Every structure is written in structure tokens, then in C-alpha cells.
Image (cartoon, rainbow, N blue to C red):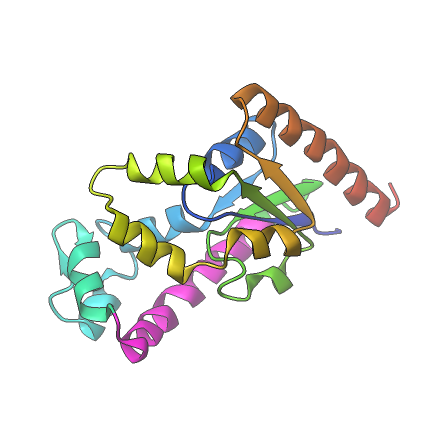
Amino acid sequence: MTRPLVVGLTGSIGMGKSTVAAMFEAAGVPVFDADAEVRALQGPGGRLVPEIEAAFPGSTDETGVSRERLGALVFGDPEKLARLEAIVHPAVAAKREAFLLEHAGAPVVVFDIPLLFEKGGANAVDTVVVVSAPAEAQRRRVLARPGMTEEKFAHILGLQTPDSEKRTRADHVIDTGTTLERTEDAVIELIDQLRAQSAARTGL
């Protein structure tokens, strides 16, 4: 069986990627949410909790992995961050492969991966969709989040590939700087294109 056309969906913080992912899902396109899988693996009873606690003592509690405690242990330490990624990434990759097998009959699937470019994941997908919005809209959305500060926002932006570069490297760009209705129309139109691309590839 031919595997589905794999779409890499990404976008910087505050660009509306989760909203667009939900639109894909509502239109019947299976979506693999990398962040949600990480949360499940690290949450209460999560498979990675014992391994992360062993590698980073004191990083877990009754809720699973404590993002605050773990963050304090690995922040600014590339060696510790690499150790953490060596635990998490293979587990997420296994979940992603299982997802592909589960949806092998679908013409198109979406991998929702926030750090698609930053971690080199763009090479593992067939086409890249970047969710983008004007910088002012992004700033307004992010600073409205609980606990967000100018400093945190600046730090996060510094870790992410600039939006302008993402747009340049994208095969498709979805603009969320407009109304929800227009964004949804753009997503539906893109899904039609992607399904056609998948059909052409498989000769159907």
C-alpha cells in the first residue's frame, strides 16, 4: 500500500498553527500532534517518566515530568538538552511511525511539528506548510498568554527560525492574519490541492 502524502505543518509561536491543525482535522485529515505526544509520554503514568527521572533526578512529581523542574535542570546546558532529546525523540518517532501505519489508507496526513525546521524535520516530510501572520498580530497573541513576558517572548523567538525564512522555505503558506473564515477557506483549498497531489503521485 502506498503511504499517505506527509505534510509537515509548522509555524512560529503565536502564528495560529494549532488553529490551522484543528481545521485540517475537522476536514477529515489525520493530524499527528508532536507536542501532545510528548505531553502524553511525560504525563502521569507516561512511559518516559522513569527514564527522565533517572537521567534528571528530581525532575518529576505526581503529575509526571515537571516542566518547570526539568526546564531548570536543562536550561542553557546543551549537553543535558541533548541527553533529554536522546530520550524523547526516539519515543516520539516510534509514535509517529505507528500513526502512519494506522492511517496508511489516507491520501494525506499532517505532522504538526513546531520545530520542523529547527530540528531538521523538513527532510522527513513530502511538503511543508507554514502558518504565518503579521508580526504585530503574533506579538499581540503571545503577550496575551498567561505568564508571558517581553523577555520570554524574545527568548522563544531567538530559538526559532525567523518567520521570513520559514515562509521562504515553505511549499505552502497559510495566513492567519485575516478572519477565521478566510483562513479556513485557505485550508480547505489547500487540502484539495494536497489530495490531488497525492492522487497524482499514486496514479489514482
* Quarter of the view holding residue 57: bottom left
Q: Nearer the viewer, residue 149 or 200?
A: 149
138 in relation to 171, above or below = above
1 in relation to 185, above or below = below
Residue 90 highlighted magenta (yes or no): yes
Q: How many marks?
A: 0
Q: Determine if residue 8 is in view.
A: yes
Residue furthest out toward the right: 203
Q: Nearer the viewer, residue 143 or 38?
A: 143
Question: Which quarter of the image is occupied by the C terminus?
Answer: top right
Residue shown at the point (38%, 40%) measured from the top left: 139
Residue shown at the point (58%, 57%) measured from the top left: 165
Q: Is residue 202 left or right of residue 115?
A: right
Q: Is residue 179 left or right of residue 155?
A: right
Q: Position of residue 32 (x, y in %)?
A: 51, 46
Q: Nearer the viewer, residue 32 or 158?
A: 158
Residue shown at the point (67%, 42%) measured from the top left: 108
Q: Is residue 103 left or right of residue 156?
A: right
Residue shown at the point (37%, 69%) measured from the top left: 85
Residue 111 highlighted magenta (yes or no): no
Main SS class of the magenta portion in the image: helix
48 in relation to 108, above or below = below
Residue furthest out toward the bottom: 79
Q: Position of residue 173 (x, y in %)?
A: 63, 42
Q: Determine if residue 66 is in view.
A: no
Q: Which residues are magenta?
A: 76-100
Q: Position of residue 47 (x, y in %)?
A: 30, 58
Residue furthest out toward the top: 181
Q: Position of residue 73 (x, y in %)?
A: 18, 69
Residue furthest out toward the front: 136
Q: Nearer the viewer, residue 122 or 11?
A: 11
* Quarter of the view holding residue 190: top right
